[in-house]
Image (tube, rainbow, N blue to C red):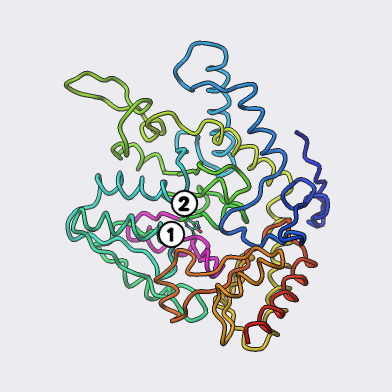
Amino acid sequence: MDITAKSKTLNLKLDVEAIRKDFPILQTTVWGKPLVYFDNAATSQKPFVVLNAIEEYYKETNSNVHRGIHYLSNKATDQFEQSRKIIAAHLNASPEEIIYTRGTTEAINLVAFSFGEAFIKEGDEIIVSQMEHHSNIVPWQMLCERKKAVLKVIPITEEGELKLDGFKKLLSPKAKLVAVTHVSNTLGTINPVEEIIEAAHAKNIPVLLDGAQAAPHMKIDVKKLDVDFYCFSGHKTFGPTGIGILYGKAKWLNEMPPYQGGGEMIRKVTLDKTTYNEPPLRFEAGTPNIEASIVLAKAINYINQIGLDAIAKHEHELLLYATDKLQKINGLKIIGTAKHKTSVVSFVVEGTHPSDIGMLLDKQGIAVRTGHHCTQPLIDFYKIPGTVRASLAFYNTFEEINIFVKALNKAIDMLK
Ligand code: PMP
C-alpha cells in the first residue's frame, strides 16, 4: 500500500510520470490508442492505494458498524470513525460536523430537506446562481415548492463570473440561505466564496458551498471560510463512488431534524415515540457505505501526500497550456474565461456539434465530456447546444494535451 509517487518536493514540482504509475487505468488503451483521460470533472481515476484498500477492507475487516460487540465489528467501526476524523482534519472541522452521504447530490438534498424543515417558511428566499449544477438547483426548487418559498438567482457575466453587485442586491431580509458552487463544473470558474460568505453573513444569512469541483483541486478550510455547509463527492476526489461528505456547522446540525428514519439515527424507539441520536449519526440512517467511507480517507491522505499546492500549480500550468493551444484553432470559442479557473476548458467549434467532436475524439483514445454537463440553465444563458469539456487532473501531462489538440484538429477537419 505504499505510494510510489515521490512528488512532494520543495519547488512544488510534481513527478507526473511516477504519479501516473499509481493509476493502473492510465496505462490502458482505448480503441487501440493509449487512453487520454480528460473527463476528471465527471469522475476521477483511482490510485493503487485506493484500489488495494477496497480489497483489503473486504478481505480483512468487513462487518457492520456501531452494532456488534465482536472483533470485526469493532475493527470496522474504528476504521469508519477514524476515517471521519481524517476527513474532518482535512477540512479543519470537528468529526461531529462530518456526515457521510452518497455524494454531493445527497448532501445538498439532506440540507434542503432538514434545514428546510427547520428554518424555511412561506415567502422566504433561497439564493442560487445561474452556473449551478442541477443538484444545487433542483433540491431547492423542491423545497420552494414544499414551503412556498422563492428561488432567487445570482446573474453571471459573459466570461462566466458571478455578478457580485447583483448578488448583494439579493441579500434581503427574506433571504434565508445562499447555495452556490465553489467551482463551476462546466466553466471551471473559481467563485469568490470568501466575499460571498462575508456579504451573506453580514446579513445573518448562512451559506452552503457545493465543493464537488473544488475538493479535488484545492485545500478547503471550513473554519477559515466560516462556511455553514460544505459538500463534496468521493468519486471526484480519487476515492470510491457512493460516498460523499457533508460538513455542517454544529450550531445548524444540532437544530436540524433527521433526513431519513431507520437504524443508527435513533436514541430510543418505542411504538409511541422515537428520540433521535446526536449529529452526525442523526443524519446517517441505515447501514452506511462502510468500505467507501474508510477508503475515502486513503484517497484524501494520498492527495495530501502529493500536496494540494503542487497539484494546483501543475494543473494551472496545464490549463494555461491547453487554453493557449485551443485558442489558436480556427472557429473554436472557449466558454468560461474567468480570471480564476481550475483546469477545465469548455468550448464550442463553429459549424460542429459537441457530441460529434466527442465521438471522434473517443475513437482516438481521448475521453472528454460533451453536452450540458447537468447545467442546463448555464448552457441556455450562452445560447449554445452544449460544450466539449476537457477537465484535467494532476496526473495529466502536456504531451496528452498535444495529442488531444492534434486529434481535435483531425475531428474538426472531418466534420467541416
Ligand atoms: N455539483 C457539481 C459542481 C458537480 O460537478 C457534480 C457532479 N458533476 C455534482 C454537484 C453532483 O455530484 P454527485 O453526482 O457526485 O453527487
Q: Position of residue 332 (x, y in %)?
A: 62, 84
Answer with the quarter of the image where residue 318 lies: bottom right
- Secondary structure under the numbered disc 1 in the rendered image: helix
Q: Amino acid at mark 2?
A: Asp
* Magenta extent: 180-209
- Residue beneath label 2, please? 226
Q: Position of residue 385 (x, y in %)?
A: 47, 77
Asked if the residue at tag 2 contacts the one at tag 1, i.e. Cβ–Cβ closer than 8 Å, the answer is: yes
* Quadrant assignment for the N terminus: top right
Q: Residue at x 45, y 74 (%)?
A: 379
Height in image: 57 above or below 333?
Answer: above
Q: Residue at x 43, y 50 (%)?
A: 105
- Residue beneath label 1, please? 197
The residue lying toward the viewer, choosing from 353 and 26, is 353
Q: Amino acid at mark 1?
A: Ile
Q: Position of residue 103 (x, y in %)?
A: 47, 46
The residue lying toward the viewer, choosing from 230 and 23, is 23
Q: Residues within 10 Å of mark 1 (few under 14, many from 20)?
A: many
In three-dimensional space, the C-alpha distance between marks 1 and 2, rounded to whole angstroms, equals 7 Å
* Quadrant assignment for the C terminus: bottom right
Q: Position of residue 81 (x, y in %)?
A: 53, 28
